[in-house]
Image (tube, rainbow, N blue to C red):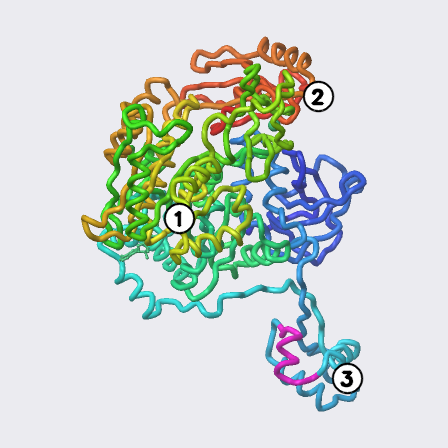
Amino acid sequence: MKNVNSKEVSVLVSGPFNEPFDYVLDDENINLSVGQIVLVPFGKRKIVGIIIGDGTKTIPERKLKTILQVYDLKPIPKPSIELMNFLASWYCVFKGLVLKMILSPIEAITSPDYEKVYKSNFINELKEIKITNKHKLVLDFLSNLNNGKTQFDIIKNTGVSKAILKDMVQKHLILERKVFKKVNLYSNFLKNSEKNKKNYEFLNLEQKLAVDRINTSIINSKSDCFLLDGVPGSGKTETYFETVRTCLDQGKQALILLPEIVLTPDWEKRFFEKFSFAPLVWNSEITKKKKKNIWSSALSGSAKVIVGARSALMIPILNLGLVIVDEEHEQAFKQEENIRYNARDMAIYRSKRSSAPIVLASATPSLETFYNAKNGKYIHLTLPKRATGATLPHIKLIDLSASPPEKGKWLSPILVGEIQSKLKNKEQSLLFLNRRGYAPLSICNSCGDKIKCVNCDTWLVEHRSKNILVCHHCGYSRIFENICKKCGVEGQIKACGPGVERIEEEIKETFPQARLIVLSSDTMNNHKILNETVEIIKNNKVDIIIGTQMIAKGHDFPNLKLVGIVDSDVGLSGGDLRASERTFQVLQQVSGRSGRHSKKEGDKGVVLIQTYDSKNPIINAIAKNNRNEFFDKELMSRQYANMPPYGRLASIILSSRLERKLENFSSELLKLAPLFKNVKIFGPAPAPIYFLRGRFRRRFLIKADKNVNIQDVILNWTRKINTPNHVKLTIDIDPFSFM
Ligand code: ADP
Ligand code: ZN
């Protein structure tokens, strides 16, 4: 790490700042380096920050404020600082706010766990102090050691008490130092062991080829980007586990990013079985103390494998040797609040700065990734078949116009018949519908009023199990009463369309004996309950599972033989850029749950897709299991429209509680819009959800050619005008959500 030469340094503080401030250090004995974490006075407060270089020497030294504390921690590694700079400029946000994310387990910095270390004080050894036997034991133990021993070690080896050590310090026989406590959880990791070789031998040919290729990059510290592409169950996880092992054999640290819902104890258990140690799990539910441990052991270099959701990317890992992004297509990698960034894209940058390869794994890659693999920017590795030897499921469309459900019901007789036959065979069925609650819309039959949220421009969703109406956008809820608030007529409120609760009702009616479970974020609101449920399903204590997309990912239910997609048309009508892509992904993921262990033709998993739009090319591509054809078509239409990955996209979202002020500011901003040949600006249009959480919202959409620096265009534009206090302006680069 680069040393800083002067005692005047520039410090980036965590907060809304892009520029560093100069400070001075008045301790001659400390050598400062870039990335060092410090505490500095800032106005009336004290803030943590990092040193980013020598001071600017533009302010006389006597006027500079003094650094209050230099933390006894390794400096933030250079690749993390580079990530901070890059992320801030790419997403048009303050560097200091990105730093705040990096330093997020602030306790780890401000109150690290220290331990006492002692070494013998050779200079004073021979003065006329009476040396007892106990003293001698300690001095002997410490002789010939330059670094000293921890209090714990000394007491364990010599049997003396803490009081003796304290006494010796007072008599200057030994020196005491407080050092940052190292957390080392991995003593049982064996390099190059026999077990490792067996694990590798277990893989099939395609898996071995993929592992070999990635290993080459790990060993040569090449920052290649791989797409590990294979149908669900093709052994992607098994494959990347092997590469993680190689990374550890190289003495480096690995980072695995997963969408939170995939990061299950099942996954952890599987990891443990492979590696004989637990990975460090970083998710939204871990305690502060755990966070602190993970963060500091990552920075010290002792953490071996960190697995986590999006924000784990911000952990300053000292010696990163490999990054895995599993389910890389998942929207969960894009943060939609505060700092809007895509952790997958930034992980690619992070790994590049660390000269480490990165593996993007998916059965349904995002179109951007597919495109990059196709044009050779990424190395495309494919696992074409299910690793267990299971056959792929048989997929059939059910045309709902030809075989409609009974009146007031949602499942076609064909699907009902298939569930029946699975029940008879004691096999499980999964009904998928990506809609929580009972019904997405309630209408008064008397006046036609659609019940809306008070904070948003959205319909309230009936949740019959709790007898409430809920807004899925802001969380507003109220008791459901069967009286129209508009016209006052009683008993005329009608539920329109199905949610999972309504399907549950229908199944209960049709199959009263069947054991039934509903999986949605309403019923599975924490990891514990979800994991228990997954176990119940695996142990065959359930016949029919009804679930939202929560169930689509990762899980492996051996006895699940039928997947019924209740409404494949949901999501296709959204009209946003990725609507088709996302529908394709989620339907393919759910389909992948069926018959994961079926080996024989007659025992094949079945997928039935209900649709009113049986000519739809997306639904047909899924039915034919022809992903690449679908992707090629989708790419062509994106190219035609100059949309990503061919063109670039950004949004500006303006919101305010005051509708008129918002309108005025939007038109002011429009007047200042730049005119460039290869940049198109649309808007300010009312957002699709115009009124959200009590705020009115307008959007600009900026579309540019690939070679345009869209960030510069937007910053130069928005800086021409001051955003008034009551208006919030958010820039969203490479947007995923258009709501
Ligand atoms: P994916 O991540 O692609 O969904 P997994 O790695 O989870 O696939 O593998 C799916 C199933 O196949 C798991 O039960 C796994 O243990 C098994 N499996 C993986 N590789 C092999 C192999 N080479 N031989 C036999 N079974 C395998
Ligand atoms: Zn609302």
Q: Nearer the viewer, residue 133 or 726?
A: 726
Name the residue that disc number 1 marks: 514
Residue 152 included in the magenta stretch of the image? yes
The CA distance from mark 1 to mark 3 is 86 Å
Q: Is residue 89 above or below residue 551?
A: above
Question: How many neighbours does mark 1 have within 10 angstroms: few (below 14), some (14-19), or many (20 or more)?
Answer: some
Name the residue that disc number 2 marks: 726
Residue positioned 44% across, 54% down in the render:
254
Instruction: Provide residue 250's location: percent of width, then percent of height.
Output: 40, 60
Residue 344 included in the magenta stretch of the image? no
Q: Secondary structure at mark 1?
A: loop
Ligand 1 neighbours mark 1 (CB distance < 8 Å): no
Q: Amino acid at mark 2?
A: His
- Corner quadrant of residue 138: bottom right
Closer to the chain start, of discs 2 and 1, is 1
Closer to the chain start, of discs 2 and 3, is 3
The CA distance from mark 2 to mark 1 is 55 Å
